[in-house]
Amino acid sequence: MKLRGLLLVLVLSLISRIGFSQAQSDTLLCVNNQLNGDVLLTLNPTATPCAGCTFIGYNIYYSSAKTGPYTLFGPAPTLSSANANSFTHVNANGNSNTYYYYVETVCDCGGVFNYAYSDTLDNRDPVAPIINHVTVSGNTTTIYWAPSTSPETYAYVLYYVDISGNHIIDTIYGHNNTSFIDNSPGRNPTQSSFAYTIAAMDHCNTLGVFNLFPQNTIHLNGIQDRCAQTVTLTWNAYKNWPAGVAKYRVWGSLNAGPPQHLGTLNAGATSFTQHVNDGEQWCFEIHAIETGAIDSSMSNRICQSISNVQAPIYNQAVSCSVNNNQASILISWKADPAADLSHFLVKHKTKQSTTYNTVATVNAIPGTTNSYTYTHSGINVKEENDYLIIAYDSCGQPFYGTHCLNGILEGYTTSDNINHLSWTKIALDSMILDSIHVLRKVGGATATNIHSGLATELTYADDISSFAGSEDELCYTIQYFYHSPQTPFNSAFHSISNEWCGSPITEVFFPNSIFPKGNSTAFRPVLTFPDFSAYEFSIYNRYGQVIFKTNTYSESWDGKMNGEFVPAGDYTYILSYTKPNGRNYHQQGNVVVIY
């Protein structure tokens, strides 16, 4: 052994004269502390560069400082076997002390010595790499990190972090492979924020401590306020950049257009509000910018179709009709079914009132109907009833829609049996009155139209003399016809007034019997309106013989013929006269003579 060592020293002393070359080697795989404090160096025999040359040996050097000086584990060579795969630094107390090691491989290539040097490794576990940033792209997350400062690093173990600890995702081999795309469905960054950390590992599968400062994805949410016409973006803070977050930038794309810079916010910001218009398509992202660095982290991308609360295009009263019971009014209106309506308030006041009072709340049914009604009961339909229908959207904002005022019909009967009718115009905002019908109902019969008039007409005289003697009551209503020139109301509507009733005045009254020898000894007609001419009153017996005739209204029949009482029984009377309007009146009937 002494001779062999001496020969090697002589060989080394001749290097400068004979010549040599240097190369890089991966002979030293890893360095690990043992439980007893020894340090185990693991070699890779297949890494020898002596192919075609003579292997001389491995020289192993160590130092307590990375910059040296280094001491040879001697005598040279430290290991003389090319198949050697380990070396133990005994009594190193490696668990407390730090040492640096490298391996020099010596080969004799025909008188030229070839030296290959391994990396310098220490006996500490591999240092955790620094995470540069974590960013989102679509449904995946990409993690970027700097190479570990430990040259023994052979691979990286990537973790995701949750409240239960660290969970291995994958192992990435290669000291300079420093990124990873996480596309696991269980860690979809569009659903939540996920944190990641990493550790370095050497060739001996010794795993260093993981990075104690995991970095997380930015998860972006957007809440649309349909009432305020805004989208409020919220996100979680990006954590654990060494220098922290400098700022956040908000980016948005409108209607598939290019990204726009919407705002820059300070490091503490986690929300941003953007005004939006109905029908727009918006996509948003948040970019976190590291302080003093070029690294940035992008959030997930969210897209929203904007649907703001729709105000009604119209809210129009279309009818204000008195019901048949003459004690209630039916109010009808139409509202935009595409609007986001919540309800309507129906307000009412009379002519004597100065303010409206709410009489009903009617729920809206958006998207299904545009027609609404309300019956206001227990009111005087013969007076002015003014209604105001107010629409409220789902945000509670009111839209003053329309007024509705009922039509009022009045009347009186004159002595010539003329019913004189007068009415007020119905009033509905935006409606144009076209015409009116005067409807008359006789007794319990169906009402019929007796007059079609212009919108400007407000009176009508109805001659009811033909109904004289009838016990049927004559009742009238006014039917109003109108339209709106505004779309979608270019169709006709109508409303009904209150009802007014007037009976024909009985012009003539006859007793139905006469007691010539009793207490009723005179028979003649009694006229309600004694303004007449050409008066003639006659009595006939059953043979058609005239037994009494007069042209004087005050003259009565006393039950006699030629001075003698007529027999008991039925007798016929005929009355005729001319009214002031020139019309002739004629009435025929029977009277009973009783003794």
Image (spheres, rainbow, N blue to C red):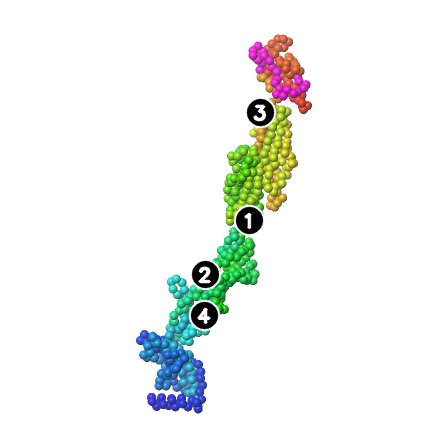
Q: Amino acid at mark 4?
A: Trp
Tell me the SS state at disc 4. Answer: strand
Magenta residues span 513-539
Please tell me in which quadrant of the rendered image residue 106 appears: bottom left
Is 97 on the left or on the right of 372, as rendered? left
Comparing 558 with 69, the one in front is 69
Which one is earlier in the sequence, the residue at label 4 or at label 1? 4
Foreground: 68 or 252?
68
C-alpha distance separating marks 1 and 2: 35 Å
- Identify residue for label 1: 311
Q: Residue at x 36, y 90 (%)?
A: 6
| Mark 3–mark 2 distance (CA, rounded to whole Å) | 88 Å
Disc 1 marks a residue whose amino acid type is Ala
Give the labeled residue for mark 4: 145
**Magenta-drawn stretch contains 514:** yes
Quarter of the image with the C terminus in it: top right
Name the element at disc 3: loop
Mark 4 or 2, nearer chain start: 4
Residue type at tag 3: Glu
Q: Which residue is mark 2?
A: 236
